[in-house]
Amino acid sequence: MVAATLHDQGLGTLLFDLLTGSESQDRANIFDIRLLAGRLAAAIDWCGSDPAVAGLNIGLFGASTGAAAALVAAASRPEVKAVVSRGGRPDLAGDALPHVTAPTLLIVGGRDLVVLDLNRAAFDQLGCPKRLEVVPGASHLFEEVGTLEVVASLAAKWLLEHLKGATVPGDGRSSPAN
C-alpha cells in the first residue's frame, strides 16, 4: 500500500524482501542487520548498474529491522538521498547512526511505546537532517484504520522533498524524484 502511494506520487519503487522464504524461518536472520544491509547494498548496486535507473536519486523505506538495514546502507552509500523508517528499529543500526548523512524520517506508532523510546534514542545519535513523527493511536504494525495511510503520506512527502533536486553523485546535476 505504501509503495502504491509512493508510485502514485511519481516515485519509482523497487519492493522486495531482504530475506528468502527459507531464511525468514530462522528468527536470527531477521535481526542480522549486517546480512539485511548487505542485501540492500546489493540492490543499490544493481540500480547503479542498470542504465535505465543509474544516476537516479535513491530513497530507502524500511520497516522493523529493515529500517536498521536501510540506515546502515545509507551510512556507506552517498547515492542514498533520503531514508524513511516505519515502526523501525533504528537502534539496531548501532555505530552507523552518526554516519548517516541522508535526511531521515522516523515514523512510530503512538501506542508502540517501547519502539518509540528506541527511536528517540536513535534519533539523538543521528547527525543528519531528521524528524521523528508519532502517529497517534497507531500500534507497531499500523493496523488501525487510517494509520498506514498516514505513514504513506508522511513517507511520500519526505521522499519528494529530499529526492527532488538532490544532486546525483559524480555529475553535479539535479535529478527529478524517482
Image (cartoon, rainbow, N blue to C red):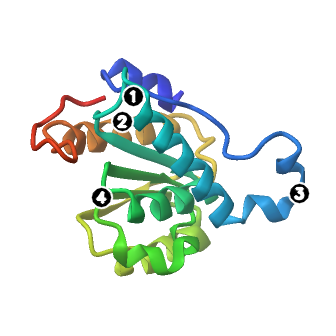
Q: Where is residue 147 drawn, in percent x and y?
A: 50, 41
Identify the disc placed on residue 6: 1
Taking 145 as reference, is 168 left or right? Answer: left
Q: Where is residue 69 drawn, in percent x and y?
A: 56, 59
- The one nearer the camera, 4 or 76, is 76
Q: Amino acid at mark 1?
A: Leu
For the point 10% across and 44% down, the residue is 172
In this rendering, the answer to whether 26 lies above or below 114 is above
Q: CA distance from mark 3 to mark 4?
A: 31 Å
At mark 2, the secondary structure is helix
Residue 64 appears in view: no
Q: Where is residue 128 drawn, in percent x and y?
A: 26, 68
Instruction: Name the N-terminal-most of marks 1 and 2.
Output: 1
Instruction: Name the N-terminal-most of marks 3 and 1.
Output: 1
At mark 1, the secondary structure is helix
Q: CA distance from mark 4 to mark 1?
A: 18 Å
- Mark nearest the camera among 2 and 4 is 4
- Mark nearest the camera among 3 and 1 is 3
Residue 162 appears in view: yes
Whether tag 4 and tag 1 are in contact, CB under 8 A, the answer is no
The residue where tag 4 is placed is 102
Q: Amino acid at mark 3?
A: Asp
In this rendering, the answer to whether 89 lies above or below 10 is below
- Mark nearest the camera among 1 and 2 is 1
Whether tag 2 and tag 4 are in contact, CB under 8 A, the answer is no
- The one nearer the camera, 9 or 44, is 44
The residue where tag 2 is placed is 153
